[in-house]
Amino acid sequence: MANQHSTRGRAQDRARVAGGQDHEVRYEAHKEGVSKDAVKEAVDEVGNSRRKVEAKLDADK
């Protein structure tokens, strides 16, 4: 029997910024052109929703 891989969770995972994972913070910082500290502060302020974090970073530019 072949393994069935589900896509469940992938969209949810991409919709979040894991502030405690360095590679996620680095990616978002590079994408938005800001420092890693700015991304971490945005996550602390608005939560880990990628949409909200990006909106906060754009507003702070």
Image: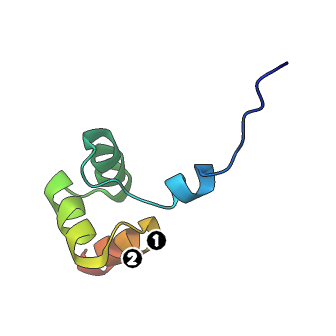
Which quarter of the picture shows residue 44?
bottom left
Return the x and y of residue 24 as percentages of the image width and height.
Answer: 34, 46
Residue 51 appears left or right of 38: right
What is the three-letter code of the residue carrying label 1?
A: Arg
Residue 55: assigned label? 2
For label 2, the SS is helix
Return the x and y of residue 61 as percentages of the image width and height.
Answer: 25, 74
Labels 1 and 2 touching (C-beta < 8 A) = yes
For label 1, the SS is helix
At x 36%, y 66%, the residue is 48
Q: Residues within 10 Å of mark 2 (few under 14, many from 20)?
A: few
At x 40%, y 75%, the residue is 52
Return the x and y of residue 5 as percentages of the image width and height.
Answer: 72, 34
Residue at numbered disc 1: 51
Residue 14 appears left or right of 42: right
- Residue found at the far front of this picture: 1
Residue 32 appears left or right of 34: right
